[in-house]
Amino acid sequence: SGLVNFSESARDFVIASADAAPAGLTSDNWQVTASNFTGTGTWSLGTEGNNLVLSYEPSSSGFGTWIAGFPGLSDSTANGDPDGDGIVNLVEYVLNGQPALSSPEILPGVATGSGDMVFTFVRRAESKEDTTQVFQYGTDLENWTDLATPAVTAGDVTITADTPSVGLETVSITVPKGANTHLFGRLKVTQ
């Protein structure tokens, strides 16, 4: 719980130093418990010289792996926007964007032809495992109703797997317009 703003990248934390190298460290005499930790990687304990080191290795998928595929970014944090297109890296990840290139075409679309509002976006299938995606809608830009975006089709949310291509999903959310003259919608993504 003491790790604030932790990002999915390889990290080493020196947790103890000694006059001599720690001895007797084996996997049967230590345990790393990471309850309430939101990361998806693995923790390990080891020695480096005279230090006892707690190490974190991000998982082989998810935001950490995706952002690592774009070396040289001026800001590779979840809330960074190195291309200045107004879409933060975490949202670019979910919507399968390019954090180094402006890509407004990935933003969700809205259709109202049937009288209902249909909010549609394409997401990386893996993003549902390491992010929380919430559709928010309302009749003004101040008061929002939250609708969690599920992993599979449920209620007014339709998810079409491997569309438009393998590894991507098209998500369509239908909100009845009713007597409302205006409806607004937005996608909120957290890690």
Image (cartoon, rainbow, N blue to C red):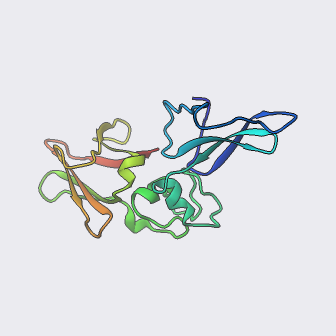
Q: Which residue is pictured at 14% across the width and 41% down the height? A: 179
Residue 156 percent coordinates (x, y): 17, 46
Quarter of the figure that contains the N terminus: top right
Q: Which residue is pictured at 38% across the width and 48% down the height? A: 129
Say which quarter of the image contains residue 55. Answer: top right
Regarding residue 11, the answer to whether it shows in the image is: yes
Q: Nearest the camera: 44 or 82?
A: 44
Q: Left or right: 161 with respect to 45?
A: left
> Count the marks: how many?
0
Q: Which residue is pictured at 42% across the width and 47% down the height? A: 130
Residue at the extreme right: 19
Q: Nearest the camera: 88 or 9?
A: 9
Q: Left or right: 71 with respect to 150?
A: right
Task: Indicate whether 181 appears above or below 143.
Answer: below
Residue 92 percent coordinates (x, y): 46, 59
Q: Which residue is pictured at 50% across the width and 69% down the height? A: 102
Regarding residue 88, the answer to whether it shows in the image is: no
Say which quarter of the image contains residue 81. Answer: bottom right
Residue 131 percent coordinates (x, y): 41, 46
Task: Indicate whether 68 appears above or below 24.
Answer: below
Task: Indicate whether 174 appears above or below 145.
Answer: below
Residue 22 percent coordinates (x, y): 77, 36
Q: Nearest the camera: 141 or 22?
A: 22
Q: Nearest the camera: 110 or 12?
A: 12
Q: Left or right: 40 with respect to 68?
A: left
Q: Left or right: 49 with respect to 179?
A: right
